[in-house]
Image: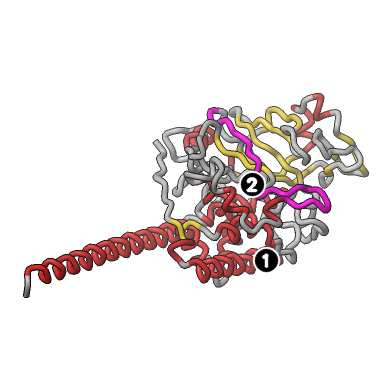
């Protein structure tokens, strides 16, 4: 064989060797990542049921200090949380030392200070479990039970971006009125034998109060994030106009995602993938009202999209608002870890997991069966949407590897 032919042959063999090695490494990396996703899924399922207990086995004896130290830029709580039951028990039972009107917004809520100085947001019950909210997908009052269910779905999906939420019963006469500010107290009234209040908010009206059953009111309690982590509010790129007859650009521009990818903070970092995750999350719970979102301040796009205010969810189990998935089907990208988790939850696993996760909540049953069934059916639609993307663009283009290291020091 001539020298030239030998050189060419060696070059070809070298190229084959390099490509084979890269292929094997990629496959090994992908396989290892998939195995880790499976292990994470099994860990989540093993710790799914959270019993609310008063005992706290931790070097820190304050549940509030434990929860505060959990918070890092990419998650609100860690994967393993043996203290979660004790913290949620404290949220559901600690003495209320102050009650005030809620922070500004469109919906009725109160800001409570619990024993130990912890701030929480209380959202009152407005509907029975089987009530169906008709009209637009964002219609109706906030649903307190939706906040509880959304928190547990966040755990199941492995996002860990929603503040802790638990159901709670409060006695308005003995627990709230004696410690209420004048501003909140002035909104109390009695209707029949029931104590009611209407609070202060954009849509709060004396003619539309929230009423207890006698003096006892059911609601949800959301743990306030630590003040050392101030929030920054952002307009959601796929937000609605909320004006009849006026469409947002994403509703008519098929290339809208290309424009989003060119703007900060969606042109780099994890934020766009967080938007996709959130679209999946919101579609499963039926939340079409995320017109804004929060991250931590001065994060330059690196912190998570925090899953706050999920109460406009679980309103109508028969309504599957596909437009919520617009970020997914317009961008056609999704995290590999999210895709793996969704696939692990099909065939009825999601419904069963969600029902099990909420079983020990004080206001259980949190959701009616039609809503649990709806979550399972919506999961199939999410999986079908991703499949349409992979059929069109290929798996490598759609499934994006994005595992950022997390630290709880």
For the residue pair 43 and 83, the one nearer the viewer reads as: 43
Residue extending farthest to the top is: 182
For the residue pair 114 and 106, the one nearer the viewer reads as: 106
* Residue beneath the point at 62% across and 30% down: 115
> Relative to 32, is 285 on the left or the right?
right
**Residue 237's mark?**
2
Q: Is residue 291 above or below residue 393?
A: above
Which callout, 1 or 2, points at the residue further toward the start of the chain?
2
Q: Is residue 154 above or below residue 381?
A: above
> Relative to 351, is 58 on the left or the right?
left
> Relative to 154, is 147 on the left or the right?
right
Q: Is residue 375 above or below residue 99?
A: below
* Residue beneath the point at 67% across and 48% down: 310
- The magenta stretch is 228-248
Q: Is residue 240 magenta?
A: yes
Residue that mark 1 sits on: 374
Q: Is residue 243 above or below residue 10?
A: above
Question: Dot 1: within a 10 Å radius of its alpha carbon, few (fewer than 14), some, or many (20 or more) residues?
Answer: many
How many tags in the picture? 2
Q: Position of residue 368 (x, y in %)?
A: 71, 62
Q: Is residue 405 magenta?
A: no
Q: CA distance from mark 1 to mark 2?
A: 26 Å
Do we see residue 222 in this rendering?
A: yes
Q: Mark 1 falls on what kind of element?
A: helix
Label pair 1/2, CB-CB below 8 angstroms: no
Image quadrant containing the C terminus: top left
């Amino acid at each position: 064989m001539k020298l030239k032919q030998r050189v060419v042959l060696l070059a070809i063999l070298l190229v084959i060797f390099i490509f084979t090695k890269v292929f094997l490494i990629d496959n090994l990396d992908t396989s290892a990542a998939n195995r880790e996703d499976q292990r994470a899924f099994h860990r989540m399922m093993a710790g799914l049921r959270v019993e609310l207990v008063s005992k706290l086995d931790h070097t820190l004896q304050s549940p509030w200090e434990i929860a505060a130290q959990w918070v890092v830029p990419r998650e609100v709580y860690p994967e393993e949380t043996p203290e979660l039951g004790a913290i949620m028990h404290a949220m559901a039972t600690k003495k209320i030392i102050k009650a005030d009107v809620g922070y500004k917004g469109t919906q009725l809520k109160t800001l409570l200070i619990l024993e130990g100085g912890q701030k929480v947001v209380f959202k009152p019950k407005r509907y029975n479990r089987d009530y169906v909210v008709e009209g637009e997908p964002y219609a109706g009052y906030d649903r307190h039970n939706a906040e509880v269910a959304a928190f547990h779905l966040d755990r199941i999906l492995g996002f860990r971006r929603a503040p802790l939420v638990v159901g709670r019963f409060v006695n308005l006469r003995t627990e709230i009125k004696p410690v209420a500010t004048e501003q909140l107290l002035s909104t109390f009234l009695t209707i029949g034998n029931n104590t009611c209040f209407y609070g202060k908010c954009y849509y709060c009206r004396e003619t539309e109060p929230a009423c207890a059953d006698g003096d006892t009111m059911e609601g949800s309690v959301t743990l306030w994030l630590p003040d050392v982590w101030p929030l920054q509010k952002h307009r959601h790129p796929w937000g609605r106009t909320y004006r009849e007859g006026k469409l947002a650009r994403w509703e008519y521009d098929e290339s809208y995602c290309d424009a989003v990818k060119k703007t900060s903070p969606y042109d780099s970092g994890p934020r766009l993938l967080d938007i996709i995750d959130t679209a999946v999350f919101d579609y499963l719970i039926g939340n079409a009202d995320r017109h804004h979102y929060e991250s931590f301040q001065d994060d330059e796009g690196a912190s998570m999209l925090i899953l706050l205010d999920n109460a406009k969810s679980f309103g109508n189990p028969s309504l599957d608002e596909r437009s919520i998935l617009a970020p997914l089907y317009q961008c056609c990208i999704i995290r590999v870890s999210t895709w793996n988790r969704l696939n692990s939850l099909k065939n009825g696993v999601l419904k069963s997991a969600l029902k099990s996760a909420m079983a020990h909540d004080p206001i259980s049953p949190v959701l009616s069966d039609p809503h649990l069934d709806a979550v399972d059916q919506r999961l199939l639609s999410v999986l079908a949407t991703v499949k349409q993307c992979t059929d069109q663009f290929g798996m490598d283009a759609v499934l994006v590897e994005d595992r950022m290291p997390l630290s709880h020091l």
